[in-house]
Image (cartoon, grey):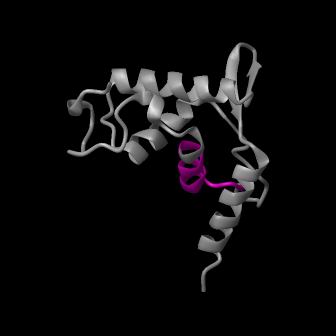
Amino acid sequence: MIKANMFYCEKPSIKDYRDMNLTDIIKEYLYTKGTWDNEGNPCNKEVRPDELIRSAFWLYELKDNATNRMNVKYYCEKRARENLWVRETYGIPRIIIPDDIWQECNDYNRRMTNRK
């Protein structure tokens, strides 16, 4: 159970860190960070669990403190491992974004940037 003082809102959408949805956090991350670079090459197909912390904070209106950072990172990595989305390189875990999630976000990002 997360204490009420860990949120910015009065009625939080989650009661426990386990209630977070990794797919939603990844989508929020890709919407803000993008799915292609300046040359138009695909990017952000792999992310470190700690890169998702800010997106989770925004999505669930969590305050930025050490406890929230540690728990969000832990549960993002845990869910990714359960889904077999993790690859370790030199001992550093990286979450491999599933192609369908990445493509959905890419399509959305393209629609939003190509507006006339």
Q: Is residue 34 magenta?
A: yes
User: Residue extending furthest bottom?
Assistant: 116
Q: Residue 8 or 35: which is nearer the viewer?
A: 8
The image shows residue 113, relative to residue 59, as above or below, that is below
Q: Is residue 3 above or below residue 9?
A: above
Q: Nearer the viewer, residue 64 or 9?
A: 9
Q: Position of residue 84 (x, y in %)?
A: 74, 27
Provide residue 63's location: percent of width, then percent of height. 30, 35
Q: Judge whether residue 19 is colored magenta.
A: no
Quarter of the image that includes the C terminus: bottom right
Q: Report which quarter residue 15 is drawn in.
A: top left
Q: Which residue extends farthest top?
A: 91
Main secondary structure type of the part rendered in magenta: helix
Residue 92 lies in what quarter of the image? top right
- Residue drawn at the location 74% of the way across and 57% of the way down: 103
Q: Position of residue 113 (x, y in %)?
A: 61, 72
Tell me if 34 is positioned left or right of 85 in this view.
left
The N terminus: image quadrant: top left
State left or right for residue 3 relative to residue 78.
left
Residue 69 appears left or right of 104 = left
Viewer-proximal residue among 39 and 114: 114
- Please tell me whether residue 88 is drawn above or below residue 40 in the rendered image: above
Residue drawn where x is 44% and y is 23% of the image:
71
Q: Residue at x 24, y 42 (%)?
A: 8
The magenta segment:
25-36
Q: Position of residue 41 (x, y in %)?
A: 79, 55
